[in-house]
Image (cartoon, rainbow, N blue to C red):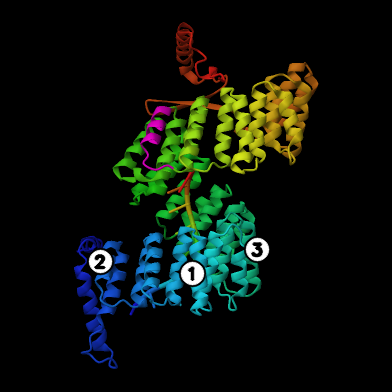
Amino acid sequence: MSANKLASSTRFHPIPLIIRNSLQWINNSTTLQSTPPFTPKPPSIWATNLIKSYFDRGLSKHARNLFDEMPERDVVAWTAMIVGFTSCNDYTQSWAVFCEMLRSDIHPNAFTLSSVLKACKGMKALSCGTLAHSLATKHGIDGSMYVQNALLDMYATCCATMDDALTVFNDIPLKTAVSWTTLIAGFTHRGDGYSGLQVFRQMLLDNVEPNSFSFSIAVRACASIGSYAYGKQIHAAVTKYGLHSDIPVLNSILDMYCRCNYLCDAKRCFGEMTRRNLITWNTLIAGYERSDSSESLSLFSQMGSEGYEPNCFTFTSITAACANLAVLGCGQQVHGGIIRRGFDNSVALVNALIDMYAKCGNINDSHKLFCDMPQRDLVSWTTMMIGYGSHGYGKEVIKLFDEMVRSGIQPDRIVFMAVLSACSHAGLVNKGLSYFRSMLEDYNLNPDHEIYGCVVDLLGRAGRVEEAFQLVESMPFEPDESVWGALLGACKAYELSNLGKLAAQRVLDTRPNMAGTYLLLSNIYAAEGKWGEFAKMRKLMKGMDNKKEVGKSWIEIRNEVYSFVVGDKMGPHIECVHKVLKLLIWHMKDDGDVTDLDSQHES
DNA sequence: ATAGGGTTAG
């Protein structure tokens, strides 16, 4: 029987474990001369061992039943329960067991507190964490290194700032690599990779030897600030330290190269890995999804032929890849694979499917998935709103927003961007402005550059360009290129050349390489008949990489994707396309319903 | 018999 078969046959029959444990005990007692061979271990030790084994197999119910039947339960047994629930990510149960333990007058030790602090971290429950902290002080075990590191981790994860975590860190007399790594992770996981890297540097200056854990989080910090230069240096250090075959470290290096947009380095790193796991593949597939979705799909099939089973992470990236490519047929097949594996209970994955159907033009399927969800998170609502918005259903977006707030979910900046952009495209200007005001008044959210960009776009599209300009002037911070860009778009559409030139100049001040801006500017000059200026702009554009500025459209017909740009000759098919277009226009005129989606006026 | 930090999606 293979090892695999053995594992699966024991999964639902835990009895053989007892036999295995007893054999182990017999072996131990016969080999160790100092232990009397005929004294059996107390039953509570047997039971505690068994509890741990149950949890290792995910059988928390069995563990709980056994624990309930134990006549005497010491700290170790209680702690094993707390550790077990935490390892199954059932933090609430873990905390409940801890409270039950306190009620039973059992004193927690350092093992118990470091474990329960991990549960507090998992629940992000600062109140529980501080209670555990005071108990640690009360029982005089706050000097334990394990407890100190766990406190540091809990405060870093649960608090709004790093202040409390830093206080704990500074009070640790002997800072080990674990303490330093926990602090680096604290900064990095809240998005402050820069501080994370500074702490890593301080760790090296303090002559604390970094290990594989420290390296992987330091590389993650580089990825989060997009620093290829630091990332590459740390990669070199990893090789020097002989950690070039540590899979998690290499996975984070791979991810760093992907996020810094150095796909060549990523592919080389991947090729040099002698050992890989599922995360390795998922990292590369996710990396390619962002910049080369079709390559991402071919990596997916390659992964399958090498015998790896995709998980939820894999499918999320693959679904996003189908969305980016707008390949409905492929996306539907992926959806089938998700259902077949029972992954369709994952909220994140359904969110990705909603986005995929919307981007493939199938907004009804998006809505059906959204309605059938037993649970929705903020991303679900946002994705559905962006989908409706991009299809021109402005009023549906507003309905969804109100429904979301009623269901008790707090909106964030991204949701407001979805609402504002939907209002902008549907011409619901006043409605959009009232949402803009309500952001700060009702939800205490400070509008940032992107939000101002949306509002400028909202006003600009409706032709209220003067008001848009006044808004830009009254902004509490310096407008950036997203704000000026929105104004420029409006100036172009309404042929306001003077303001347009000012806006374009501002965009170019901040982003001198934006080919699209030169294009808009050159068109303004062309419209004015200033052909000398026009030629100058076009000449400036020539030298730059403006490949990404070309707006592409594509359509999937019989499993083939055809993409085309404005004025494309599209080979032999173009004649046929024109005929179909003519027919479509004729039908639309006949119906008198051409502007159906664009005509949602404010009521 | 019970305890620590790291890597993948949205």
User: In 3D space, how far apart are the residues under numbered discs 2 and 1 (Cα atoms)?
Assistant: 26 Å
Give the labeled residue for mark 2.
Answer: A65
The reply to whether the C-beta atoms of the residues labelled 3 and 1 are less than 8 Å apart is no
From which residue to which does the magenta span run? A363-376
Tell which tag, 3 or 1, sits nearer the viewer.
1
Give the labeled residue for mark 1.
Answer: A132
Give yes or no for residue A418 being in the magenta stretch: no
User: In 3D space, how far apart are the residues under numbered discs 3 and 2 (Cα atoms)?
Assistant: 48 Å
Residue A105 placement, left or right of A484: left
Q: Amino acid at mark 3?
A: Gln
Give yes or no for residue A372 being in the magenta stretch: yes
The reply to whether the C-beta atoms of the residues labelled 3 and 2 are less than 8 Å apart is no
Q: Which image quadrant for residue A195?
A: bottom right
Residue A106 sits above or below residue A435 on the image: below
Q: Secondary structure at mark 2?
A: helix
Give the labeled residue for mark 3.
Answer: A198
Residue A489 placement, left or right of A36: right
Residue A77 sits above or below residue A130 on the image: below
Q: Which image quadrant for residue A223?
A: bottom right
Residue A492 sits above or below residue A320 on the image: above
For label 2, the crowd category at 10 Å Cα-Cα, with few meaning under 14, some 14 to 19 and many 20 or more, is few
